[in-house]
Amino acid sequence: MTVAFIVLSFFVHIVTIGFLVVISKKQKALQKERGNLMNVREDVKGLLETYTNEVKRENEALKQSLQTQTSAPRIYELQQQTQQAAEESDKRPEQQERTDKRENIRENNFSIPNKNEDIEDTEDTYEVSFKAKVLSLANQGYEKGEIAKQLNMGKGEVELLLKFYQ
């Protein structure tokens, strides 16, 4: 019986050692794979940094080119505006005399309206908005589809307006 226990013990030891060998091999493979993943991670990180730096440089170049493009037309526009202002200042004495004459003529032609003249009655017209129409019809008990038909609107529009005001 002791021989059977010894044989069984050796068998269990051999199986245990076999499991340990398999586990150690898997552990080494996982460590190697992890090392490869770390290398890939570092490579990707480096690539991303270079791409972002490249994009930053391109953005700066674009920004500078846009600033030079927009500043050149602005300078030209400012030069044109100063030239126009100078020309207008030269014309002002002549225009001032003309406007003075026109004002004198207008002052002389002004007539005071008579109290007896008929003053036209002006009526203010109010137009009811679609929102108000929709709300009033809804308060009167009409359904959404009926309101949409009466106002030539979509049913979805009516539903949306009613949702906003509920």
Image (tube, helix red, strand yellow):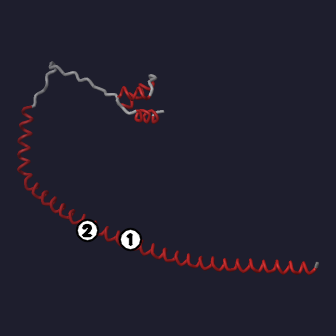
The label shown at residue 56 is 1
Quadrant of residue 103 in the image? top left
Q: Residue furthest right?
A: 1
Q: Position of residue 22 (x, y in %)?
A: 70, 78
Comes first in the chain, label 2 or label 1: 1
**Residue 164, position in %: x, y?**
45, 36
User: Image height check: is 86 above or below 166?
Assistant: below
Residue drawn at point x = 6 percent, y = 46 percent: 97
Please give left or right for residue 76 compared with residue 126 in the image: left
Looking at the image, residue 76 sits to the left or right of residue 42; the answer is left
Give the residue displayed 91% in from the left and 81% down from the top: 3
Q: Label 2, secondary structure: give it.
A: helix
User: Residue 29's x, y, as percent?
Assistant: 63, 78
Residue type, numbered disc 2: Thr
Amino acid of disc 1: Lys
Which residue: 24% across, 66% down?
69
Q: Residues within 10 Å of mark 1 (few under 14, many from 20)?
A: few
Q: Which residue is mark 2?
A: 68
Mark 2 or 1: the one toward you: 1
Front residue of 34/124: it is 34
The disc placed on residue 133 is none
